[in-house]
Amino acid sequence: MAKLLGIDVGTSGCKVLLLNESGEVLKQATAEYPLSVPHPLWSEQNPEDWWAGVQQCLAEIGTTDLDGIGVTGQMHGAVFLDGDDNVIRPAILWNDQRTAEECREIDQTVGEGRVRAITCNPPMTGFQAPKLLWLRNHELSNYQRIRSLLLPKDYIRLKLTGEKATEVSDASGTGLFDVPNRRWSEEMIAELELDRSIFPRSVESSVVTGKTYDGIPVVGGGGDQAAGAVGTGAVVKGVISVSLGTSGVVFTAIDAPEYDQGGAAHTFCHANGAWHAMGVMLSCGGALRWYRDTLCAGSSYDSLAAEAAQVPAGCEGLTFLPYLTGERCPHNDPVARGAFAGLTLGHSRAHLSRAVFEGVSYGLLDGMGLLRGLGASADEIRVTGGGAKSPFWMQLLADLFGKPCVTLECDEGPAYGAAILAGVGVGIWPDVADACAKSVKIRSRVTPTGMDYSTFYNRYQELYTHTRDWNPL
């Protein structure tokens, strides 16, 4: 029986899991590491902390008799390496918002229409390209030392194999990738006067990129959203998945590189050899964690959901905007701000709790609307992440989406999909669709009650318009 390992370098910690060719998880391990916020709206981590966490997990699981390894992780982060492959400075992460000026610089230099035609996306503050320009504009001495630029999961690949490589799904989120043609954009790199040699080679997600020092093949893997979609079976049209992580993602596979002309949804290369579209909100589970830790210390997520269930839909006039780290979808607004609006003396903590659940769910509904505008449809929505364990949240999402929401037998996130990609790469399955068909199974289903949230959702949308000029910085 084959043994496949998936490694996920997340934002709050890493996860490593071992599964067999039936899709059964045999072992798993996790390790946490810190996040640094040196200035408001900045977000950084030390790549050596990722590697230490991965090593801890590998030691716990063991690496004997493995057939293949897949790697995945948080997208967009910039790992700057010198000529000796030493980390020059902390990695700048996906939710860092310091690069608004550099995004404008990219549009002005290359041209708005050309950028979108090449990358299928507007420049966004989380992407790698504006981070590289920011370093050139603000830390020139560090910029001049760069000899390699890697994404988070690819730094782990380097540590495992000594090879510098990426794959198409993660590279699509750099802002420097020719998404329709699945390769680095020589035009973007040249127009921005960047050094082509610092970018690693790019392969398809199930291609073997090298071997560990013990001879275990390591495949390309995928960005966390593409790998997570492999884990949910969202690799064929007609399947929409929703991920309830630190960020919130609504995701669908597409057959051609069609993109949202308004720039609110992403179109990237998918790990299945085609493409995908997704709407990403920056603070989903992250907003819930902030609320719990800041205002409800000592409470569990389950207790907050139980409180929220006691309050009627719409929270009696209270609305929460979840823009705690700016927002990507649908506003692409790095200085968007969170808020509780409509507070009165009649509101209790239970009202606040429900408002947070509803607010982040409205953000996901924004993303669902964008995907439907691109023609996406499904008979059911596959929901993953920690929030999928909450009956209250699942019912709220089913009512908002107007579709049954289902959970999966194995909901281990991107690490599960990375392990499946490893299996495809070493020949356990012939392709990604076949692997998913044999591995991904439905566990439970929640159907809509018919509750109408349209009035409350409209109020939520209007509030962003009223608050979008808030920028205290």
Image (tube, helix red, strand yellow):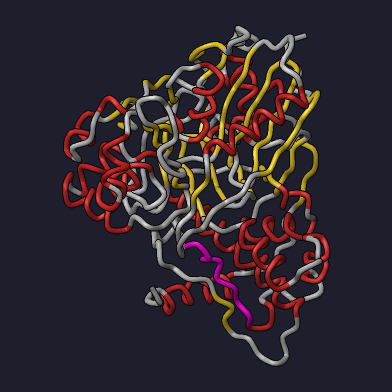
Q: x and y percent of residue 424 in the render?
A: 59, 15
Q: Is residue 122 visible to us here?
A: no
The part of the image, by quadrant, that contains residue 358 is: bottom right
Q: Is residue 264 left or right of residue 141?
A: right
Q: Nearer the viewer, residue 145 or 208?
A: 145
Q: Is residue 401 left or right of residue 29?
A: left
Q: Nearer the viewer, residue 164 or 145?
A: 145
Taking 299 as reference, is 72 above or below it? above
Instruction: Characterize the magenta stretch by its predominant secondary structure.
Output: loop
Q: Which residue shows up at 55% across the image and 71% down it? A: 321
Q: Which residue shows up at 44% across the image and 77% down it? A: 467
Q: x and y percent of residue 66 in the render?
A: 70, 12
Q: Which residue shows up at 69% across the image and 76% down it? A: 352
Q: Nearer the viewer, residue 197 or 271?
A: 197
Q: Is residue 399 visible to us here?
A: yes
Confirm whether the magenta stretch covers residue 133.
Answer: no
Q: x and y percent of residue 274 in the render?
A: 44, 26
The part of the image, by quadrant, that contains residue 30 is: top right
Taking 182 as reference, is 129 above or below it? below
State the residue lying farthest toward the bottom. Answer: 345
Q: Which residue shows up at 44% across the image and 25% down it? A: 167
Q: x and y percent of residue 127 in the render?
A: 39, 45
Which residues lie in the magenta part?
Answer: 318-325
Taking 56 as reference, is 456 above or below it? below
Specify the quadrant that holds the C terminus: bottom left
Specify the quadrant that holds the N terminus: top right
Confirm whether the magenta stretch covers residue 319.
Answer: yes
The part of the image, by quadrant, that contains residue 59 is: top right
